[in-house]
Image (cartoon, helix red, strand yellow):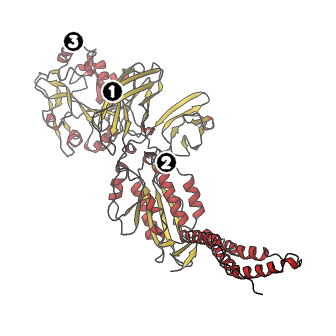
Amino acid sequence: MMISFDNPVWWFLAAALVPLLVHLVARTRPKERRFSSVVLLQELVRLQSRHARPKDIILLVLRTLLCLSLALAFLLPYYGGSREGEGGRALVLVLDDTASMGAADGQLVRMNAALSAAQSIVQNLAPNDRFNLATLAGYSHFIFDKPESARPLILRELARTQSRAAAAGDVRETLTAALTQVRNLPEEVQGQVLLISDFQTSGMKTALDALEIRDGELCCVNVAQTSSVENTSVAAMRMTPAKPLPGQKVTLRVELRHYQGAAPRRGTVPLNVSLSAGNVRLSHPCELTCGSNSVVQFELVAPETSGDWLLSAGIEPDSYSGDNVRHLVVPVADKLDCVTIAADRAHLGFMQRALENTPFLRTLHLPAIPENGADFVVWHAPGADDVAAIQRRLAAGETVLIVPDMQKDAALTPLLKGEQGYLSGETRTDGESWQVSKGDINDDSFSLFDENALAQELQKAGMYSRLGADIQKLLPPSAKVLLSYRDSVPALVRVPMGCSNLLIWNMPVTARYSRLGFSPMFLPLLAEQLLHARSSTNDSELIAGRDFLLFELPLGADPSIVRLLAEDGSELPVKSYAAQLQSEQPAMPGVYRWVAGDTVLHTVAVNFPATESDLQTFTPSVNAPVMEARAATDNSAFTGRIPLWPWLLASALLFFMMELLICRRPVVKKNHISS
């Protein structure tokens, strides 16, 4: 152990010579003038100065020690710690700058407390110590590949770091990379990962618990002052259908969520949900039960023209207002894309012709599933090898209609049950036909039809081919049988799957086995089933702070004239990749527009991450000791050294007080003069 200094300005020590110089310079020699009347006074002064000389020496010593103590205090001395030339310490700071760090515990914002702790730690470490800095918002971002002796750069990066409305999706990846840097240090270097965070449960607990942490590798600094903060948010917006036609009636569902604070309360929270949908302004009052969810529903009509339809829902601001507004961009299209998959288009018979003649459909027949997505996929006789592709389409929000193989179907069993199996088909050869009767005729997909007229048309269209009764055993509880045969075998079924719906069309589609295609009701019946089986708004939103904004250029478009504008009208830098434009920085929450001149080409909404709204915190495991932010600013917490400058300041104050006492004490004199 030794005494070292953080401040290399050694010339401060020269301040200790100031009292001595003042003492020497202040000694003056007045011009002598002898008067006979002052001889006795001269003798008196000589005796007094002889007694005062020790007092002057003591004052000189005290003043010298006072200046020396102040000079040493400015040099920031410390006792202990590593010496120059030794390995020193390597500290990897992982700073949580996600959206939850913008919450305030009373008057103190969590991010401000985190930055203050980080800056104090970096400033107090030794000059030969090494540093690295990583932030959690959005994606892993380290300043260096390994810890470096770059204190000024780290401090400058901390000075411009702030809480961002981005998801903490890569907590585990960032901490794993930080631990790897610490484990790859030389043996003589003592390394540690310092995680400064509010330790939000929903954003960090799962990732942190999954890490294998050795003793001493990770230290946690908790900047949250309370275990939870009360908050109300607009959690989600979903529109059904997700891609309406011009003038179509739609349903918008706005989900609200209330999170309890450190002092849970009962009762309800009164809210007023305001909605902006183009030129339409609506509001809906509601009462949200404390600690629960609620849904407010709006019935709207899509615009009469195609294009992007921007909707914004908001509630009154609270103490954490970043999640009080949510945006949704809904594409309104004149036509919807439909892809039919069959080895030969004739296999889909009158269904193929009906799809091609549906006014709002843009139908394309292909022998295999394409790479590009579509609004509807009509698949004839898929096999077991096609199940994965069907599941991907459903997960992407596409509506899939399956016309099974009426002889031996191999797709429905693995699709609905997750296991290999076949369904046997049935064919009537006795001249009789199966009659289709009503299933759930009260479903909205039949709202355009007269019930009796529809029943008569279905009765006329005899069915000579179908899958047998075993299909009923495969259907999950969420399935809805829309049409069925008179012997209760399902004829048309809608099954919610993925982000959309699966339609099972257990009826023949060729004139050889059914005359349903000749009915004037067939085309509207098929169209209505497709429209009402469409998904609500897809949940695959952009991750704020992580995902980049992308725009596919129209064929022949000049990328130099396309700009990306933020909500406030400012232009954002973009990069061009062949026929695609991409923002240079990940998107923060807000509304963005790709424009060419005065024409808006595309609108994109990036929302506050829902995982950041729950401000409940947790305590990490025992392998990661936790300390409060104030304790983290103590030098000895990470450096292993004791600061001496407070003692020096106290000594300087003591010397000053001693000087005052001596100056106030009178000099004891003898009241006689020798003859």
Dot 2 amino acid type: Ser
Q: Nearer the viewer, mark 3 or mark 2?
A: 2
From the viewer's perspective, tell me whether residue 112 is left or right of residue 362. right
Q: Secondary structure at mark 1?
A: strand
Q: Residues within 10 Å of mark 3 (few under 14, many from 20)?
A: few
Amino acid type for the residue under numbered disc 1: Cys
- The quadrant of the image that shows the C terminus is bottom right
* Viewer-side residue, 368 vs 83: 83
The numbered mark at residue 163 is: 2
In the rendered image, residue 149, in percent from the top left (x then y), is placed at 57, 68
* Residue 75 seen in render: no
Relative to residue 279, is residue 363 drawn left or right? Answer: left
| Classed neighbour count for the residue bearing mark 2: other residues with Cα under 10 Å, few (<14), some (14–19), many (≥20) | some
Q: Tell me which label, 3 or 1, sits earlier in the chain.
A: 1
Res. 645 image quadrant: bottom right
Front label number (3 vs 1): 1
Disc sitting over residue 453 in the figure: 3
For marks 2 and 1, give the CA distance.
Answer: 31 Å
Q: Position of residue 51 (x, y in %)?
A: 69, 81
Measured from the top left, where is residue 205 in percent x and y? 34, 54
Q: Which mark is residue 286?
A: 1
Q: In this orientation, which residue lies closer to the viewer: 38 or 504?
A: 38
Picture layout, residue 120 above or below residue 352: below
Judged from the image, the secondary structure of the residue bearing numbered disc 2 is loop
Nearer-N-terminus badge (3/2): 2
